[in-house]
């Protein structure tokens, strides 16, 4: 019998770490349970902050102390210490931005001031170095710390050091530095250590006080569940947000309009990915309607392919239109409405 990714991770956690270390207890549910969808303060494994739920985790460790849930302000007598989201994706031919898609699951814990761990079980492919960068920069601006690992010994070390605050904090500090080194090695090699080179390769425009990430998303991408574009869009959103954490972030969808946003806000308000895109602090979804000065012919052509997949003539039209838009946004001839 082939086990699912979740079941593999959960079995490994229990087998390797057990149910308790140094009076720090494990909360974990079998794959068949939906209890992980409940908030941690309600007995589950989901964390949120300031009214936004960030997705369920696979496991969490807690101590018997008072804790206030950052999502709803509820006080409970179980204080979470570490929240872990795990995946066997490295053994399942997943790579690139597919690995970003679960990044937000442990982010809710990090926003609450806890340690979030994204555990990717060792496999046929390697952890995308960008993930280390995303988590490193998230740790610089959020209340908690975010660790990326393919080794459960990292979690074991954290649990064993937890009761010695200096040792616990030092381990996290050193580990974050190692994460940065992994990220920076790729950044120097692939982007020549230059954020402008990064921008060219990652559909990004960098300005003094804001950054624009552009993508060919359409309304259908978010209404057709088979496309999973929402997961990809959220992953790319968090990558850009944390890489440029000191700037306002405009996420530009040139094939969409204000009408599309209104329709999605109305009909997809319970969709986790769309809710995150619309409610993440300092992130603003923008459409062709938000480009001040845009040529009417370019707008017309892009809207003619707004519901078409990006291939063939539609792909050519999109590339031609966005090339012109990007060039003039960079020069200042076009501007994004605030």
Image: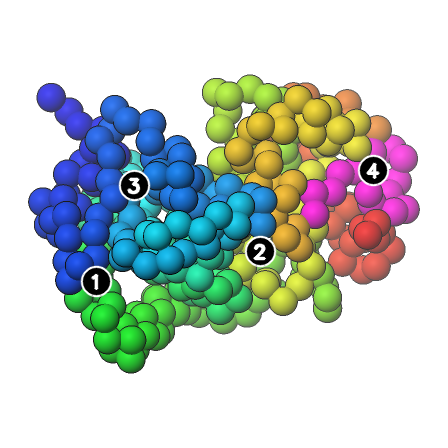
Contact (CB < 8 A) between labels 4 and 2? no
Q: Does residue 288 show up magenta in the picture?
A: yes
Q: Which mark is residue 289?
A: 4
Name the element at disc 1.
helix
How far apart are labels 3 and 2 at the CA level?
25 Å
Judging by the rendered image, the residue that carries numbered circle 3 is 58
Name the element at disc 4.
helix
Residue in view at x 18 percent, y 36 percent: 8
Q: Categorize mark 1 by other alpha carbons within 10 Å: few (<14), some (14-19), many (20+).
A: many
Name the element at disc 2.
helix
Q: Does residue 326 show up magenta in the picture?
A: no
How far apart are labels 4 and 2 at the CA level?
22 Å
Which percent across, then down, holds residue 98? 41, 40
Check the picture and name the quadrant holding the N terminus: top left
Q: Categorize mark 3 by other alpha carbons within 10 Å: few (<14), some (14-19), many (20+).
A: many
Contact (CB < 8 A) between labels 1 and 2? no
Label 1 vs 4, first from the N-terminus: 1
Label 3 vs 2, first from the N-terminus: 3
Judging by the rendered image, the residue that carries numbered circle 2 is 241
């Amino acid at each position: 019998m082939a086990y699912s990714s979740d079941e593999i991770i959960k079995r490994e956690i229990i087998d390797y770490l057990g149910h308790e270390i140094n009076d720090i207890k494990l909360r974990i549910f079998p794959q068949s349970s939906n209890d992980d969808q409940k908030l941690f303060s309600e007995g589950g494994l989901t964390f949120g902050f300031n009214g936004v739920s960030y997705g369920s985790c696979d496991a969490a460790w807690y101590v018997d102390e008072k804790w206030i849930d950052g999502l709803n302000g509820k006080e409970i007598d179980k204080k979470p210490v570490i929240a872990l989201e795990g995946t066997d994706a490295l053994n399942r031919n997943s790579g690139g931005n597919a690995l970003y898609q679960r990044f937000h699951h442990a982010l809710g814990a990090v926003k609450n001031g806890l340690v979030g761990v994204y555990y990717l079980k060792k496999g046929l492919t390697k952890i995308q170095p960008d993930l280390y960068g995303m988590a490193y920069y998230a740790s610089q601006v959020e209340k908690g710390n975010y660790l990326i690992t393919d080794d459960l010994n990292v979690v074991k070390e954290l649990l064993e050091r937890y009761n010695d605050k200096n040792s616990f904090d030092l381990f996290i500090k050193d580990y974050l530095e190692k994460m940065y080194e992994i990220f920076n090695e790729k950044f120097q090699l692939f982007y020549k250590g230059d954020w402008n080179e990064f921008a060219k390769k990652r559909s990004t425009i960098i300005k003094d006080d804001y950054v624009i990430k552009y993508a060919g998303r359409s309304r259908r991408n978010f209404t057709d569940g088979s496309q999973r574009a929402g997961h990809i869009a959220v992953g790319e959103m968090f990558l850009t947000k944390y890489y440029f954490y000191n700037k306002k972030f405009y996420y530009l969808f040139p094939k969409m309009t204000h009408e599309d946003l209104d329709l999605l806000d109305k009909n997809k308000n319970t969709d986790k990915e769309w809710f995150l895109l619309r409610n993440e602090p300092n992130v603003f979804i923008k459409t062709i309607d938000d480009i001040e000065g845009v040529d009417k012919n370019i707008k017309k052509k892009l809207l003619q392919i707004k519901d078409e997949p990006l291939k063939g003539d539609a792909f050519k039209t999109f590339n031609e239109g966005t090339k012109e838009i990007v060039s003039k946004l960079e020069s200042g001839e076009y501007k994004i409405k605030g």
